[in-house]
Amino acid sequence: MQKSRQAALSNTSERRSHDGMVLAIACLAQFMVVLDVSIVNVALPSIGRDLHYSASGLQWVVNAYVLTFAGFLLLGGRAADIFGRRRVYMAGLWLFVGASLAGGLAQDSTWLTIARAAQGVGGAILSPATLTILVTTFSGKHLPRALGIWSAVAGAGGAAGSILGGVLTAELSWRWVLFVNIPVGVVATVAALGYLTEAKGHNPERTRPKLDVIGALVVTAGLSALVYAIVGTSTQPWGSVQTLSFLAVAAVALVGFVVYEARVPANPLVPLRLFRSRSVWGANLVMFLVGAAFFAMWYFLSLYLQDVLGYGALRAGMAFLPMAVTIIVGAQTSSRLLARIGARPLLLVGTVAATAGFFWLSEISVHGQYWAHVFGPGCVISLALGLLFTPLASAATAGVERHEAGLASGVLNTSRQVGGSLGLAVLATIATDRTNSLLHANTPAAGVSRAVLAATDSGFVRAFQVAAFVCAAGFLAAFVVPKLAKPAPVAERPTDLRSFSTSS
């Protein structure tokens, strides 16, 4: 009896250790993917000088990554379901690391832009696999805790990108914002080879359903055209032939995608039945709206700190450290409260806090100070971001079959990236229009440079005000998401995602 008890305890300890490593593997890759959305922001001026980017072309260092990341996420999520979490994780990881190496070695702007696009494809394959790993490894009360850690890491990646970007650019060179992925990728590869296996019941040798390549190409083309059209408004007016043409292409492609997916006989890229669930489509709507606001915050704050307050790259990067910590606090708090109060209350609190934080942030000025005008609202918004990630991830995967977890996570991440891309483009256009209108209206006697600073600051203020209204729309959308049912007692608790059944 004593030996059997000791054996059971030993097995339990080994299982916990193994699950901890699996969690670390998923979180490490997700952190790296999210990190690369923002890590280049602080380094952009150095990149532009070294590789001779034009003023308008420099934006593609960011947009090439975001476009391909958003466009291929659905295919990446589906691939994880069909080909298995381990092999898709490894494929995405190697492509991501290889593209990072190529980007760090870039000798001209075209080379770097292509490498960043390849990074986006690798990230789109890798990111859904990380959530698939979690929901096929953990169950019951352990899943919300794992999602909380994963959410904290993913949320902190955006802020940490600005911090690391500033440190690496100031102390080494901009190339290290890409090279830094290589040692991380090597560690993740070694850990995955040692600990990551296919989910129980997944047979890689069986006849696999075919990927919906046509659907993937159509939706990728539609999303890419839509994002490109919005991004292009920074140099082209909304009514230009170029913008209207890409919007028309996007509309035709996305409508065609929905029609095709409704008629495809087997294994569609996105089974439209997923969206019969209030939890799924409600979570995606909220993610789209808050993503539009949050994605833009890091961009505008980085510019405000450097262009208006005159911070250097290192100082600007370190200014985001408290916000990264606050995201982690919010995510951990959210994961502990989710099983007690459900998703909807957390979403309501998070969107209200975000709305208040953006209105507070809109009080920035040319004579502003970090501790008085940036630290407080930045931390409030970051806390809101941490509070929102876990309930959104849980709601988006609640009620779906386990083998479609990758697809559900791909849809959610697509909503975040598309919302972020569109939100940044729209808010940047609003900020630019506000700045230009003020510069054209008058030039104060204090001089042109003071006028430019004042106009630039006013543009950022207007962008933060609009972001606050977007978060308020997210508050209203949160009422669509039902509360997740409390976990059943251990003896009754099911082992798959249906343990997160939803109530009306």
Image: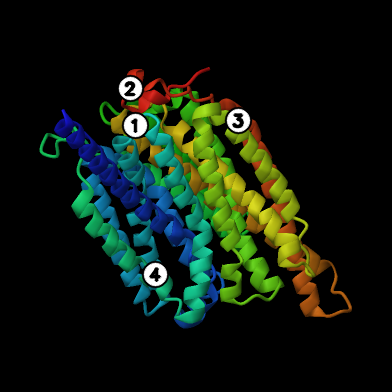
According to the picture, the residue beneath numbered tag 4 turns out to be 178
Q: Would you name the residue on which mark 2 appears?
A: 494
Q: Earlier in the sequence, mark 3 or mark 2?
A: 3
Q: Position of residue 96 (x, y in %)?
A: 32, 60
In the rendering, which numbered label is found on residue 139?
1
Residue type at the position of mark 4: Leu
Circle 3 residue: 345
Q: CA distance from mark 1 to mark 2?
A: 8 Å
Amino acid identity at mark 2:
Pro
Q: Which element type, helix, strand or loop, lies under badge 3?
A: helix
Q: Earlier in the sequence, mark 1 or mark 2?
A: 1
Contact (Cβ within 8 Å) of mark 1 with mark 2 = yes
Q: How far across and down, in percent of the image, does residue 424 sit?
A: 58, 54
Q: CA distance from mark 3 to mark 2?
A: 24 Å
Applied colour scheme: rainbow
Seen in the picture, residue 6 relative to 189 is either above or below; the reply is: above
Sequence-wise, the earlier of marks 2 and 4 is 4
